[in-house]
Structures are given as C-alpha cells and as structure tokens.
Image (cartoon, rainbow, N blue to C red):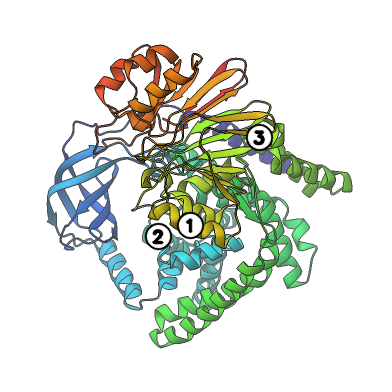
Amino acid sequence: MEFLRKSKIILLFSIIIVVFSFIRTKLSTNSLYNENDDKITGTIIQKKLYNNRITLIVKGKEKVLVNCYDCSNNMTIGDYIEAKGKFKIPNKNTVFYLFNYKNYLKSNKIYWTFNINVYKITKNNNIFYNLKNKIINKVNSYRNPYLNTFILGVNSLDSDIYSIYQNNGISHLFAVSGMHISLMTLILSFILKKILKKEAIVYILITIFLLFYMFLTNYSPSVIRSSLLFIGLSFNKIFKFDLKAIDILLIILSLLLIYNPYYFYNISFLFSFIISLYLICFSSLISKFKNYFIKIFIVSLISFLVSFPIIINNFFSINIISPIINMVCVPIISLIIFPLSLLTFIFPFLNNILLFTIDKFETISIIFSKISINLSFGHMNILLVIIYYLIITTIFINFKKYKLGLLILFLLFCYNMNYFNINPKITFIDVGQGDSTLIELPFNQGNILIDTGGNKDYDLSNNTLIPYLKASGIKKLDYLIITHGDYDHMGSSINLIDDFRIDKVIFNSYETNDLENSLISKLKLKNIPYTNYSRNILNINGYKLYFLNKKHYEENEDSLIIYTKLNNKNILLMGDASKVNESELLNEYNLPKMDILKVGHHGSKTSTSLEFVENISPKYSIISAAKHNLYNHPNKIVLDNLVGSNIYETSNYGSIKFILNNKIKIYTCL
C-alpha cells in the first residue's frame, strides 16, 4: 500500500507540474536580451552549414540562434565568439496549425535570432569540446548520413528518403532515443561487467558516458529522456529508493518541464515521453506475448495509437499500416543497421557493408511506401485529444469490444469533422506577396480555393496550402478558381494539382498565357475538367458565386471579380481588378454594403478608389501582401480610402479566418 501511495503522490505532483508548465507557455518569456542590443558574446555550441549561410547556436547570457551570411568557415564548436549585429524575434507560423518556428526555438530555450555584421573568433581548448569536434570530424569523414543520424543525433538524411520514412511511420527509428540508448548501455554494461566486479562503479561509468553523450547530441529531448531514465533506474537500484520505472519517468518529466515548459512544443519530447509512459504502464500486457515479432507488433501498435494525436496535429495524415511496417523495420534497424553503425564508427572498413545494408533497407522502405494507406485528419483540439487518450487508456486497461467500437466511432467523427461544421468559413491564407482564399461551405457541401499564390523560391503548395487544407479536414477541393494568370495568383497551382484532389478548375476569360497553358496541359493529363467564367453564376448546393467582371484584354483588369453571400454576409473578392473594373461595377450593379472586401491588387494605388469604397462601405477589408514587399503594398492612399473600415493585412496578422455565424467571428495567426 505504501508503494501505491507513493506512486499516486508522484502522479498527482506530475499532473500539477504539467498543467502549471502548460500555463507558463502562455505567459511572456523574460529574456536577458532585448531588441535594442547589438552585441553578442558566448561559446559556439552548435554549427550548421548552408549554401551562403552558417547558422550557430551561441551560449552567452542565454542561447541565441546566430546567422552569419557569406562568412569564412573558420569557426568550430567550442570557440568563443564576439559579434555585432541585430537581434530579431523569431517568426511565428502565419498559417493556422502549421509549424511554429518561434515555439520550436523556445523548446530549445532560444528566444532570439541574431544576424551578424562583424565578428571575432577566439579558439577554445576545452577538452570536452575538442573531443566533441574530433568525434564530429570522424563521423563526417565517412560521408555516410546515417552515421550522423545514429552517432551524433543529427538528421542528415536525404529529404526524399526521409519523407518516405515519415510516410511509412518509421522516422522515429532515426531519432536517437530509448532503443538506441538501451543498446549502447547494454553493450557498455556487458563489457564493463567483464572488467569490473562492482556493479555500482559500472553504473557510474555508464552515467558519465551518457552525460557526455547528451552533450555530444546537443541535449536532444529524446536522448535526455532515455539517458535520465537509465540513470534514474540505476541509482534507484544502487540506493534502493524503491521507485517504479513510471515514477522515475514522471519525476524526469516534471523536472524537465520546470526547467523549460516550452518542451510542450517539441515533437521529439512529446513522442519520447508519451510513448515511453504508455509502454511502461502497460509492460505487463506486452510481456504476455512471447513471440519476438508479435511483441514488436504490439509495441508498434501501442506506439502508433498513443502517438496518433501528435502525428495528426503536426503532419495531418497518418499511415494506418505503419504498425506492420514497424514490425519489419524495427528489427532491421535495432539488430542490424544501428549496431553496424556503432561498429563502423570504430572500424571504418565496415562502412561499405553498412552502405550496402542501408541501400537494401531503403529499397524495402520504398516498396512499403507504394502500398501505404494514408488517411488525412483535421487538426484535433485539446478536448478531442483528451477524449482520445481517455478512450485508448481504458482499452489498454481492460479491453472490451464496445470500447473498440467507441474508438472507431470517435475516429470516424474526427475523420469527417467537416460534416459537422454548421457555419460557412472564409480564410485569407498568408502566401506572402500573392493571393489565396479558401471558402468552406457548411456541412462540407463545398470547398473552393480561389488562387494559390506563387513563390519561385518556396514550394507554397506542399509547405503551406496542402498542409493547411489537410489540417482543416479538407479531403478535396470542389473548385479551384484562378482569377487570372499572374504568377503571384496561380504559381503554386501546378504542384497543387499534382498532390491534391481537385474536381474542377475555373479560369478567367482572357487569352491564356504560358503559365495558364502549363496548368491546362496538366489538367488534361490528369483528366480534370476546366472552364472559363465571365459574367456567370456558379451554384454549389444552393450557395452562389457571382462572377461580375466584363471581358478585358489586360491581365489584371480581366481578373475574376467574385461576389457571394454566405449566411447573409456580403463578400466581394476583387482579385487584381483596377479602378476601371470598379467603375464598371458601380455603373452596372446595385452593389450592397459589403461585410467583407478582399481589396484589389494587394492594396495597390491602381485599385480601391474612394468612390468605390464609399459605395460598398466594407465593414472588414482584407489586404493580402508580403511584409516589406518590393511594391510598398498597401499604398497609403488606399489605406486612407479605407479609413472607415476594419483593415486586416496578412503582412501584420498572418492568415485571417472569418466564421460567418449570426455575428462574424474573426481569428488571426499573429
């Protein structure tokens, strides 16, 4: 009973710490730097090379991510740096649900980035940094990215093959964690016990090794968790503290969250602790199975189920056969590739054998990726996450068929959440200097994307549009509407067509340009119907989109102008239409007062005349433009003309979502 009472106290204490830490993440961070500082001094603790940039993590008063452009590569880890430059607050995500770089850096206790203007390097002869540099240089000399991954904990894998691992649900095998630490400590323990007779000394030496290994891997959360768990279990055994593994794990969790509550935003931290927590709690269930492969399948299944919300809320789709893939891949990695990597580090002549083995493993992974079954789920809010964990926990505690049925019903609800949306939504997606607007009709009656934006240096389709559509629970677009053929409105359309289901595409009336012809060729290849709309009505389940513009022979003036009324809210989307178009609208239509106006041409002075604004009196005006863009959009004249309207600029607010209830609800990213 004393044993049970102690565990309950630790559990209660841990829950309090978790809740308190989550609340702390919502509070402001007290950094030791401020935006007016222009100097940084400290030790370089991490270094990465890019094309024309060196990125450092410098530890001075606190950790700072430092960018050095066109710098000489004369700095190494452990060196002391003095630099002048400019501090900058890291960027948040400007599209709902997507990767938040600011919170990610906070999870590493980094609150600022710093761009170097001038710097001075002082070499450091610290023994630990020298040893770390020698190990890094030796690993790099093999030119084998898997050694970087398994020895240094640095993901250097080719992006294409790593995407396949993610798709297969086995990318966790390439993040140094419990499996890898267990094997290393098992080998060390075996060797040391042959040499030393006192078990306590063996554990102390392994602890010293693990402390250095945490330092070598830059204190990766998964390495910290697995290393501290081993150390805790060892000291528990030596000093007979009479604690269970789950107690030690919860104490480690609490201490780490007290140290840095922003670990909540680190995927590696979440995966490591949530999976370990459930595997330890239900170890008795796993131990019932004696067959090695069945046991791996059960472990993979539990890991799959408990990581489901984390995967969905970060990647928005999941491979439902990943437990089976893991059953094949875990033994290959844990029994062959990872041990062979450790041996190769010591015996370089084994590198060719390792590369041959890896090549065959990659082939197997590619085959699995072709038969994978990936399902997209919308973002799960905190209430759904809690309900999910309550259901699967009760299943693990006492399996009953009705509980499995409840889980299936819950997952079906999550998969089809959009059918339960009772209000129309319109989202102005931040695509930088461009346009992209998503209309979601109630009860999943229709999803319309108007323009895709375009960025020649960045794949907006796969990095922004598709993730956002998936996170919104959208499985397909009923219509993709291209207002006109400018790159900043349709540059990402071809990639979008390649990687997302689209039922029909609508163009404007003007003669097609090269970019539009490229898209049309792709549409023909994929048998996707398309048409041109000018002065027509698009009816989608009773919801109507009116195309108001006349035909013109100038690209911007031929831009589609779309009017719609959703839940008695008047919405006017002006594309890149000019003052010429505005005059035509006023002359030809008796336009109502607008609730929402998407301002024409990104706020350029060629659009949004005072006469036009006074006639439609928009309650909310949206300007889609990049921050510090070359065109100085929006123009001051336009802002002055809109002075009576509530202006939302994507450059200031990020993406802007309107939920059209009886009252308009507005959500912004920034």
Count residues near mark 3 (Cα–Cα under 10 Å), then give few for <14, some for 14-19, many for 20+: some
Q: Is residue 604 visible?
A: yes
Residue type for callout 1: Val
Name the element at disc 3. strand
Disc 2 designates what residue?
217
- Does 216 sit above or below residue 532? below
- Does 258 sit above or below residue 59? above
Disc 1 designates what residue?
223
Label whose residue precedes the other's in the sequence (2 or 3): 2
Give percent across and percent down for residue 234.
55, 58
Count residues near mark 1 (Cα–Cα under 10 Å), then give few for <14, some for 14-19, many for 20+: many
Nearer to me, 168 or 87: 168
Disc 3 designates what residue?
540
Name the side, left or right, on which 108 lies relative to 322.
left
Nearer to me, 116 or 494: 494
Name the element at disc 2. loop
Name the side, left or right, on which 227 lies relative to 3.
left
Query: Which tag is nearer the camera, tag 2 or tag 3?
Result: 3
Q: CA distance from mark 2 to mark 3?
A: 54 Å
Name the element at disc 1. helix
Q: CA distance from mark 2 to mark 1?
A: 8 Å
Q: Residue furthest right?
A: 401
- Give the residue at x 46% y 80%: 343
Give percent across and percent down for residue 546.
55, 29
- Does 231 sit above or below residue 184? above
Residue type for callout 2: Thr
- Give the residue at x 51% y 14%: 592
